[in-house]
Amino acid sequence: MNLFTTIALLAFVAGCAEDPGNGAGTESASLILTNARVYTLAWDEPAPNGSVKPNAPHDESGWRPDAEAIAIQGGEILFVGSNQDAMEFRGESSRVIDLAGATVIPGLVDSHTHVFGLGALLDQVNLIGAATEEEAVTLIVERAKSVPKGEWIVGRGWDEGAWANAYPDKALLTAAVPDHPVFMDSLHSFGGWSNQAALDAAGITAETEVPVGGEMRLGSDGQPSGLFLNQGVEMLRDAVPEPSRETLTKQLLLGLHQMAADGYTAVHDAGLDTRAMSILEELEATDKLPIRVYAMLSLRDEDLIREWIEKGPDSDTDSMLVTRTVKAYYDGALGSRGARLLYDYADRPGHRGISGDGYGFNQALNAQAMKAGFQIAIHAIGDAGNREAIDILETVFEEDPSTATHRHRIEHAQVISPEDIPRLGSLGIIASMEPPHAMEDKTWAEERLGPERILGAYAWRSLREAGAKLTFNSDNPGSDHDIFYGLHSAITRQDKNQQPEGGWYAEQRMTADEAVRGYTQWSAYASFREDKTGVIAPGRWADITVMNVDPFVLADQSPGELLSGRIIMTIVNGEVVYE
Ligand SMILES: [Zn+2]
């Protein structure tokens, strides 16, 4: 037993009076986790400035766990406390897992994902790291063994930069894989390489028109060589058929299982259409969802939204798939200068991005969904995009005050004018944000915004201090959903190379307590489940994440080490879905 668990045990004994009582084995557990560093998050959340509340397991020597064992029965937590007391719940069929000092926190929730997209990426043949053409082709040959002839195979990740002096062509790939159309996408998507079957399937000949800004290489025989560059890659990309329902189902499961392996017990999936919803519903009905899915219906799918307005939001909030949210799209992205700004882009005078109608936002349908009781999760990035999105929500609140209580969210909430920051708190709008985005955008965000507007960008602390609730997520697969990267970004404002020194606009950093809550308790709130999860306590869902590092202690002592964290176990509804 180490120092921390000793302290935890003492803390538990001291706190016994408020323990609901284990009833001396009245109920036996299906699963007991012991010898863990459990952070229950049952203490009060930190103040808006980040300072720790007095009932937190924290003192001048730093953080310590507040329990060491958990007993679970079925899908519910029975008991949290000491090893000894947890073992009172041991019955004949109890599984006991000694976690050997691993850290346990409430089940992680990524509150903005695109799991179909993640699964599609995982389903492609990963060519990253392939050193030669032969190596890449060998990987495709391997995959072709399990793919019916005639079906497309997509590989991704050969390095168009490193291979630029000797680009591959169709010859080797065609000889090795003659019966499947193959599209080899490059690492940065500026290069595409194919076999003859793909050229045939796409109908590409030497006469085919090449898009502006693109290149199609020809061989010595005057025919397409199979190598395409820049916009020319679109000729192959467009030829890959829409995946079948079977393929989409497989990819969704790949994505969900990957999230489970990476410690997530739930995702909020942002922008599902009719087909995606029907696949999710089928998997729920057949009990195949490994983790919980909180679905956000795409406002762009008008038929689907009308169907749900008719039905109303899901009332069965305990099930593995819950649908009560509509994902709306209000403006573009900052990097590509589509985000709507109040004033010109600092690096493109005369340009302010696009939003609203110009971006396909259906305001009337959005208002109808709100009045039917749905939570709205509205994508807004620029300061004008955010102001207009808040205005739109506020207008509906005025028309129908009942809509104001549905915990509407702004997805990304990336650049907000100082005047608008307090409006999120006062209107009860949640800022749904991606700590990794700040780290990935920092190289160019200030060029887009200039030195003043940047102060309201990725402004987690400013938002909290102004009373807004936050929830953290990755927006994968665009960003890496690795929780250790997410926590590290939130806690340090440094990238994976631990740059810049001291953190980028470090005044916006979160504490470990806040960062962990961003992915647990605050995400639970953002999905109306703060009574069910987000905290490890008796009666809550047995949704639990186990990791090999202690983010609370590392945040204080050696935050860079967070990046080497690993997930050890993921438990959803009392079942071990990954170990
Ligand atoms: Zn997204």
Image (spheres, rainbow, N blue to C red):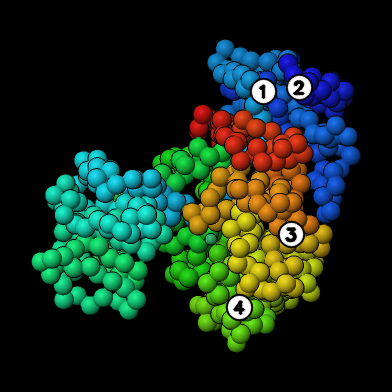
Location of mark 1 (residue):
101
Q: Which of the two labelled residues, at mark 2 and mark 4, occupies the earlier sequence position?
A: 2
Q: Position of residue 436 (x, y in %)?
A: 61, 54
Q: Is residue 125 visible?
A: yes
Circle 1: residue type:
Gly
User: Marks 2 and 4: which is nearer the front?
Assistant: 4
Identify the residue at the far left of this view: 221
Cα gap from disc 4 to disc 1, whole angstroms: 51 Å
In the displayed structure image, the side of residue 219 where residue 232 appears, left or right: right
Location of mark 3 (residue):
505
Location of mark 4 (residue):
347
Cα gap from disc 2 to disc 3, whole angstroms: 36 Å
Q: Quadrant of residue 213?
A: bottom left
Q: Are marks 1 and 2 in contact (CB under 8 Å)?
A: yes
How packed mark 4 is, by other alpha carbons closer than 10 Å (few <14, some 14-19, many 20 or more), is: some
Circle 4: residue type:
Asp
Location of mark 2 (residue):
5
Q: Position of residue 315 (x, y in %)?
A: 59, 52
Q: Name the residue at 23% across, 68% down.
A: 217
Most foreground residue, 323 or 333: 333
How packed mark 3 is, by other alpha carbons closer than 10 Å (few <14, some 14-19, many 20 or more), is: some
Circle 3: residue type:
Tyr
Q: Name the residue at 37% across, 54% down.
A: 162
Residue 232 sits above or below residue 24 on the image: below
Circle 2: residue type:
Thr
